[in-house]
Image (cartoon, grey):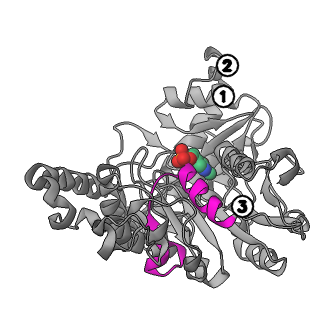
Amino acid sequence: MHPALRKYRDLARDFDRQDPLRHFRRRFHIPRGVIYLDGNSLGLLSRDAEAALQKALRSWRDLGIRGWLEADPPWFYLAESLGALCAGLVGAAPDEVVMSGTTTVNIHALGATFYRPAGRRTKIVADELDFPTDIYALKSLIRLQGLDPAEHLTLVESRDGRTLDEQTIVQRFDDTVAMAFLPSVLYRSGQLLDLEFLTRRAHENGTVIGFDCSHSVGAVPHEFDRWGVDFALWCSYKYLNGGPGATAFLYVNRAHFERGPALAGWFGSVKERQFDMSLDFEPARSAGGWQISSPSILSSAPLLGSLAILEEAGIDAVRKKSLQMTRFLIEMTDEFLASEPYGFSVGTPREEARRGGHVALCHPEGLRIGEALRARGVVPDFRPSDIVRIAPVALYNTHTELWTLVRYLREIIDTRDYERFAAERKAIS
Ligand SMILES: Cc1ncc(COP(=O)(O)O)c(C=O)c1O
C-alpha cells in the first residue's frame, strides 16, 4: 500500500470517530457487505421509514377508508403535513411546500402555471446539462402554447461540458424571456448553482424563475423565501430517503398563491370544502392548491420516518459532514488517483459553495471501472460519457468507506481488473 494512503486511513478513522452524526448510520439498513455510494440516485431505507410504512399498512388493514381521517397522521392531510416537515429544509413557510406527484409531473404543474408567454416574452431559459426529463417537460410546455421549442427554448451552453457559468446564464435573461427553469445541482458534475444570484438577476429582468432541486434537498440547505425563488420542485428518493418512486415535493412562493394552479385537480381544493363535491374548483391558497390527485399514501408514508431523521440531524450538520466527505474524496483523488497510470480527474467544482452532495470522478474507462467496483461490493453509478458518481451521504456513509473506495480504484487500475468487464451499459447503471 502507498505509505501516504495509510496516513489517510488513520485520518478517515479520526474523522469517523469524531463524527457527530455517526450514530445515524445505525438507523439505516446498509446492505450487507456493501459500500453504498449511490444515495444521490436512491437513498437507503431507514428503520424509521420502514416503521412508518408498516404503520401505514396497519392503518389500512385496521381502518380501511377511515384511515383518511383516523390514521395517525390522517392521510387526508398527509401531503400538507409532510410539506410542512420538508419546508425547514428549503427555508420556506409550512404552507409553501406540499408533497405531491413526481418531479416531472410537478414541472408540468408548476411550469403550466408560471410559463405565460406574452408579447415579446415567450422564451424559457434552461441549460444543456439539464436532466433530460426537465427538457422534455419544458419543450412540451412550449408546444402546448402553440410555440416551437427550437425557437422558444434557450439552452445555456457549458464551456467544459461539465459545469455552467452563472454569468453566462444571466446574460441570456433579456426581454424575450418569460421563465427560467434550472437545476440547483447538476446531476452529472455535482456543481451547485448560485440560486440566490440567479433569482435576483431573473427578477431584475422581470422573469419568473424556478428550480429542480432533486439533487440538493436533503444534502444542502436552501433559503427559498429569503432568496425570493418563485417556485421549485424536487424528488424524495435521493437524499430524502423516501424510497423508489416516492412522492415528490413542490414549493410555491406565497407571493404567487393567488395565481392558482393551471392544472386543476380535486386534491388542490380548499380542504374544508373538498368533499362538498362542487363542480366549481376552489383551490387552496397555499402550495397545497397545486396538488392534483389523491396522494399515494404507501409511497409517502416512509417520508414520515426519513424526514424526521433529517430534522433530528439538522440540515446544517448534514451539509457540514457532506462537504467534509466530498473534500476528503477530492483530496485523495488528487493525491492517489490523478497521476499515471490512474488517470482520474475531478469533474466537480472544488469551491465548497459550488459543490453539491456528490463527486464526479472522470475516467475514460468509467463504465468498466464502475463494474469492477460493483464486483467489490461498492455501489457507485455511472453517467455517460465518463463519470463515476460518488455520493457520500452524511447520514449513513463514513470517511473510511471513501478511503476503501480509493484503495479499490487504485487496485482496479493497477491490476487492469476493469478489462474483464464488457463496455456495455445496463438498463440502469
Ligand atoms: C434532476 C432530476 N430531475 C428529475 C428526475 C426524474 O424525474 P421523475 O422523478 O419524474 O422520474 C431526476 C432523476 O434522477 C433528476 O435527477
Dot 3 beta carbon under 8 Å from ligand 1: no
Is any atom of residue 183 visible in this view?
yes
User: Marks 1 and 3: CB-CB under 8 Å?
Assistant: no
As displayed, is residue 136 above or below residue 231?
Answer: above
Q: What element carries label 1?
A: helix
- What's the mark number on residue 181? 3
Q: Where is residue 129 in the image (x, y as percent from the top left)?
A: 76, 48
Q: Give the range drawn in magenta.
A: 88-114
Which residue is identified by label 2? 423
* Residue at figure coordinates x 62%, y 28% from the top left: 412
Q: Give the quadrant of residue 48.
A: bottom left
Ligand 1 within 8 Å, label 1 CB? no
Residue 84 located left or right of residue 407: left
Q: Quadrant of the C terminus?
A: top right
> Mark 3 belongs to which amino acid?
Phe
Q: Residue at x 74, y 50 (%)?
A: 334
- What label does residue 367 carry, if any? 1
Spatial distance from mark 1 to mark 2, Cα to Cα? Answer: 6 Å
Mark 1 and mark 2 residues within 8 Å of each other at the beta carbon: yes
